[in-house]
Image (tube, rainbow, N blue to C red):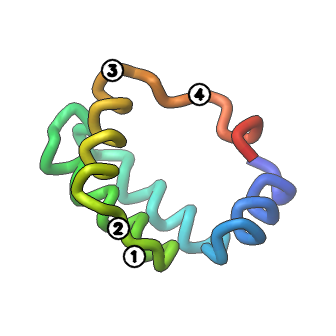
Amino acid sequence: MNNRFFDKVEQKTNVKKEDIIALAKTLQNKDLSDEKELRNLINSVSKLANTPVSPEKEQKIIDAIKKDKVPRNLDKML
């Protein structure tokens, strides 16, 4: 990914590029079909972004991931 993408993410979320890359590296060996792993991931991202996630929103995120409703092109989301 290019720096423009990371600049946009940092501008919107205040999460630094290095933190995003570190998080991505931890995900490489995770089973994202495992609900416990997904909850841990959501919790980690929530802490990084300093944004609380309600249990209801957490469940919606998990459902979206399990149903493969997450956009593949993250750059277009920004």
Q: Residue at x 76, y 35 (%)?
A: 76
Mark 3–mark 1 distance (CA, rounded to whole Å): 25 Å
**Circle number at residue 72:** 4
Q: Residue at x 40, y 68 (%)?
A: 46
Name the spot of residue 51 as percent of width and height, x first.
Answer: 46, 73
Query: Within 10 angstroms of label 2, few (less than 14), some, or many (20 or more) residues?
Result: few
Q: In the figure, is residue 49 to the left or right of 68? A: right
Q: Amino acid at mark 2?
A: Ser
- The reply to whether dot 2 and dot 4 touch (C-beta < 8 Å) is no
Which is nearer the N-term, disc 2 or disc 4? Answer: 2
The percent coordinates of residue 3 (x first, y second) are 82, 59
Question: For residue 47, which numbered disc appears in the image?
Answer: 1
Above or below 56: residue 23:
below
Count neighbours of disc 3 (C-alpha within 10 A) and say few if under 14, some if 14 to 19, many if 20 or more: few
In this picture, is 31 found above or below 4?
above
Rounded to the nearest angstrom, the CA distance separating label 1 from label 2 is 5 Å
The numbered mark, 4 or 1, whose residue comes first in the sequence reads: 1
Gap between marks 4 and 3 measured at Cα: 13 Å
> Could you tell me if the residues under marks 1 and 2 are in contact, i.e. CB atoms within 8 Å?
yes
> Which circle, 4 or 3, is nearer the viewer?
3
- Which secondary structure, mark 2? helix
**Could you tell me if the residues under marks 2 and 3 are in contact, i.e. CB atoms within 8 Å?**
no
Q: Is residue 41 above or below residue 12?
A: above
Percent of width and height locating residue 45: 42, 64
Instruction: Write down the residue under mark 2.
Output: 44
Residue 62, percent across and down?
28, 39
Label 3: which secondary element: loop
Viewer-side residue, 61 vs 56 = 56
Amino acid at pointer 1 = Lys
